[in-house]
Amino acid sequence: MKPQTMLDKLWARHVVVEERGDAPAVLYIDLHLVHEVTSPQAFSVLDEQGRKVHRPDRTIATLDHSTPTLPANDKGELPYATPEAKQQVETLIRNCETHGIQLYGLGDPHRGIVHVIGPELGATQPGMTIVCGDSHTSTHGAFGALAFGIGTTEVGHVLATQCVLQRKPKSMRVTFDGELSPGVGAKDMALAMIAKVGADGGQGYAIEFAGDAVRALSMEGRMTLCNMSIEAGARSGMVAPDDKTIAFLEGRERAPTGDGWKRAIDDWLSLPTDEGAVFDKEVRLEAAAISPMVTYGVSPDAAAPVSSKVPEISGEVARIAADYMQVHGGMAFSDIRVDRVFIGSCTNSRLSDLREAAHVFAGRKVSKGVIALVVPGSEEIKRAAEAEGLDKVFLSAGAEWREPGCSMCIAMNGDKGAPGELVVSTSNRNFMGRQGKGVRTMLASPATAAASAVEGRIADPRPYLEERKMANVV
Amino acid sequence: MSFEPFSKLRSRTIVLAQANIDTDQIIPARFLTTTTRKGLGGSAFYDWRFDDNGRAKNASVFNGVNPETYRILVAGSNFGCGSSREHAPWALSDFGFRAVVSSDIADIFKSNALKNGLLPVEVDDEMHNFLLEHPGADVLIDLEEEVIAVLGGGRSAPFSVEPFARRCLLDGVDPLGHLLNQSAAIEAYEKERA
């Protein structure tokens, strides 16, 4: 048999009706994740047509985008940004009740950002097809799943039939050879990759991330990398399952148990791309050549090493971006003043991200005049972080420690910057106005964001990380 | 769901020449708290059209434009990148657009647009550059023939739309019907896998 890519295997397992010239394939979806922003109109269509959700058991919902990250008041009322936000949350609660869908809602110990809780619950598993009305669904590919974002009409299709109509994407392998240098992480790999291929370089492809540096990443790091696939235009990114994947999932609430667990492991380990399989496109990066990265434009592909200077601006697109960002070619990143720092989002809000930031913050203060917001990705992460005292580290540094949610990544819950402010953000998009009207966003890793909060300027995190490492050795 | 079938469209163009226009520009996230898909045209490109006081910006290409006459949006490459929000095509359709033309249109936006009667047209660089340089051009888009032509200029270019989506657009139907017709195959698949 012809050697197959992981995409080939995942695709073949889920085809209900083969693709033809005049019709896409009917592709079965194992797991459908739902949140409050992109689902109400899908449920409305279902209700108008008198249809039921075909597989509520394959659907899970949570509240993350519109939810406040500040706690409820004495009366138990949450500080919603607008009455519409509250109504949107209530609409999902009602829709889940009506259709028998499990909702990890307000007050639930498992609530959190949809792409954080799927893996945390063990609902995200290798070999699955996973969709959600959210472009960062690519995150789940870190487990060896085919996971991609869909629109609301398709959310309706999945609710009604548990299937989507899709043509098979082309395959692209992004290989990170060698080893990362100290102080460099998955976020830097993602930004380096996007800078190399461009914001539309992955369009029409499913990416598989491979190479020694990817294998060396933790599951959290792999999620960060796959999360950013869409910023290169690819709807999905994936990493072959291995011992780390299995160790992460073992014992989780929705993971298989007993004999089922043993069978699952055998199955999962059969998923990786076969030796000799051919990809439609190959991209290679040298991991050792990557250093901490930061973006300087209004598209995630405008990224450069934090220790360098803003590259020369050429062309109309770059000029508009540079004007908006108030940067010019040759300007040292370390000369750019920071107003606000956001550590959170489905890209970088996991325990390892918070530890990385805390590492930098420990024994230091957020620079005067800088506002720093740390928002854990889920209730579970919040509890775990508090159990090891990370909240204390953030609070004593002068940062805010919030309730879980998407927060300033999409800035629709009231958490946002003021016009003109420069925000260093661990999220995924530096689009104009994304974090508030007129806000200038620079994307970076949790370590770089924390170091920038401490210095009040864009800062290289490596001196902070190395210093600690030496302290540990002593 | 259904919408007005699309066959031929003749209209003038509005041009936004920038590359990488993301869905946060098309409709800022603060307008996403809605629970309906109607009436989002007022929010389309809101921060490009209005200043902080909600007054129309003089410099905006949308200013004073009658959406009845300008139903084709021509944009720079990688249009519609970013978030999967279907609110983006809902807002553009409600504003009055029926087609978006670029050299390359982001996957999820394209898929969403096709399901809402908004035709994504990807053209070669030559046609793209011509349209970018000629705002207000009188353009005819023929979906049946998959041809876009600039009237009075003798210039035309082919484009292609995924055949199934094209059929749905020509007929003005949501593909849900097609999926529902596969219910026997879906149930058989579920039985076999269980």
Image (tube, coloured by chain):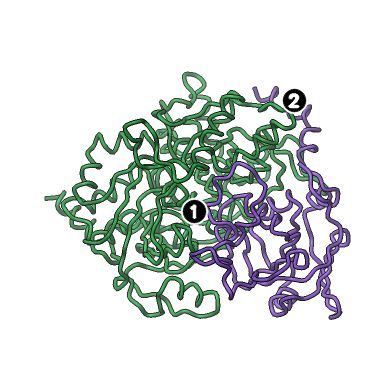
**In the image, residue B167 above or below residue B24:** above
Query: Which residue extends farthest left?
Result: A474
* Residue depicted at 55% across the width and 33% down the height: A92
Q: Position of residue A167 (x, y in %)?
A: 71, 48
Residue B188, disc: 2
* Residue depicted at 21% across the width and 61% down the height: A368
- State the image quarter where residue A42 is shown: top right
Horizontally, residue A308 falls left or right of residue B93, namely left
**In the image, residue A447 above or below residue B173:** below
Chain ID, mark 1: A
Chain with green colouring: A
Q: Please tell me which residue lies in front, A7 or A3.
A: A7
**In the image, residue B39 above or below residue B11:** above
Label 2 is placed on what type of residue? Ala
Horizontally, residue B170 falls left or right of residue A208, namely right
Horizontally, residue B98 falls left or right of residue A87, namely right
Count the marks.
Answer: 2
Q: Please tell me which residue lies in front, A465 or A396.
A: A396
Residue A228, disc: 1
Q: Position of residue A269 (x, y in %)?
A: 51, 35
Query: Which residue extends farthest top?
Result: A258
Q: Position of residue A342 (x, y in %)?
A: 35, 54
Figure colour of chain B: purple
